[in-house]
Image (cartoon, grey):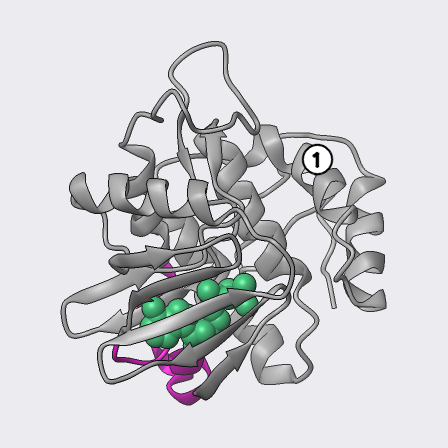
């Protein structure tokens, strides 16, 4: 089998032209993940088809196309429109009420929605039928603001070197916010704290998150300033990162 990607928890192999095998190195939430993906497909949300599962393996539809992250690297001038597309994928997902069997994460008093909770450009494949969202292992039922906050924090903290990327990051964050109607600010601090528990963080990512955990929630949190940088303080306390 041809290994096409090696991620944090799983390896992805090409089985043939139309199917991939996504294999967790340890046991994964394959049952819940495939149930959710099947549910989302039935709701018209763009996800790969699930063919078969075991405790560690998922056989999925093989999507043809680059990830949104690949396209950002190769065609950086498209950053604004790709950001807005990513924002719209959040809105489309959050239009869906959460099924009662989906575990709560960042729950609300009522009206929980389906949250992906890792909806960054590396988890969107741009196919001829449009963008398709992969990697549903963190999904849960809850407040859309937390999902958007997770994306903002993941993009904001990502330890990717290079001036061009740093410039692009701000534009991407701005695009996401303008493509999506949910304001993430009320959940930013909580998400920063949750993200700090991720065992896969690089030292630079952990340092970024600790800096952001040290400032309180406020109207500016989760917003980008005019140049697109993530603002990490309350009103008037914006700082530029990296
Ligand atoms: N259904 C698929 N079709 C084609 N490529 C895929 C598919 N699922 C995953 N991949 C490839 O594998 C990579 C990692 O997959 P992902 O599900 O995001 O796992 P990880 O948890 O490792 O991030 C993706 O960036 C993509 O290149
Ligand atoms: Mg992924």
User: Compared with residue 41, is residue 164 higher up or lower down, i.e. above or below?
Assistant: below
Relative placement, left or right, of 24 versus 215 is left
Relative placement, left or right, of 56 versus 83 is right
Is residue 76 in the magenta section?
yes
Residue 114's x, y, as percent?
A: 38, 34
Residue 143's x, y, as percent?
A: 48, 27
Q: Mark 1 = which residue?
A: 189
Q: Can you see residue 208?
A: yes
In the depicted view, which residue is nearer to us: 146 or 222? 146
In the depicted view, which residue is nearer to us: 103 or 205? 103
User: Compared with residue 202, is residue 133 higher up or lower down, i.e. above or below?
Assistant: above
Q: Quadrant of the N terminus?
A: bottom left
Is residue 70 in the magenta section?
yes
User: Magenta residues?
Assistant: 64-83
Mark 1, residues whose alpha carbon is within 10 Å: few (<14), some, or many (≥20)? many
Relative placement, left or right, of 201 versus 145 is right
Residue 129's x, y, as percent?
A: 14, 67
User: Compared with residue 202, is residue 64 higher up or lower down, i.e. above or below?
Assistant: below
Q: How many tags in the picture?
A: 1
In the depicted view, which residue is nearer to us: 227 or 106? 106
Q: Residue at x 74, y 68 (%)?
A: 242
Q: Residue at x 80, y 41 (%)?
A: 213
Q: Can you see residue 79?
A: no
User: Compared with residue 131, is residue 215 higher up or lower down, i.e. above or below?
Assistant: above
């Amino acid at each position: 089998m041809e290994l096409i990607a090696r991620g944090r928890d799983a390896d992805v192999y090409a089985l043939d032209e139309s199917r991939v095998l996504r294999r967790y190195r340890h046991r994964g939430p394959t049952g819940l993940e495939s149930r959710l993906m099947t549910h989302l497909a039935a709701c018209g949300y763009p996800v790969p088809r699930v063919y078969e599962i075991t405790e560690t393996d998922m056989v999925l539809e093989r999507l043809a196309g680059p990830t949104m992250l690949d396209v950002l690297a190769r065609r950086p001038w498209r950053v604004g429109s790709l950001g807005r597309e990513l924002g719209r994928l959040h809105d489309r997902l959050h239009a869906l009420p959460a099924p009662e069997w989906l575990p709560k994460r960042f729950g609300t008093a009522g009206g929980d929605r389906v949250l992906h909770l890792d909806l960054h450009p590396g988890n969107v494949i741009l196919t001829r039928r449009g963008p398709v969202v992969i990697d549903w292992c963190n999904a849960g039922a809850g407040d859309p603001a937390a999902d958007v906050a997770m994306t903002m924090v993941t993009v904001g903290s990502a330890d990717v070197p290079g001036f061009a990327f740093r410039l692009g990051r701000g534009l991407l964050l701005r695009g996401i916010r303008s493509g999506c109607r949910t304001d993430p600010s009320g959940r930013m601090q909580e998400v920063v704290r949750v993200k700090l528990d991720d065992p896969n963080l690089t030292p630079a990512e952990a340092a970024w998150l600790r800096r952001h955990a040290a400032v309180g929630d406020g109207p500016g949190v989760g917003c980008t300033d005019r140049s697109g940088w993530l603002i990490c303080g309350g009103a008037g306390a914006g700082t530029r990162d990296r």
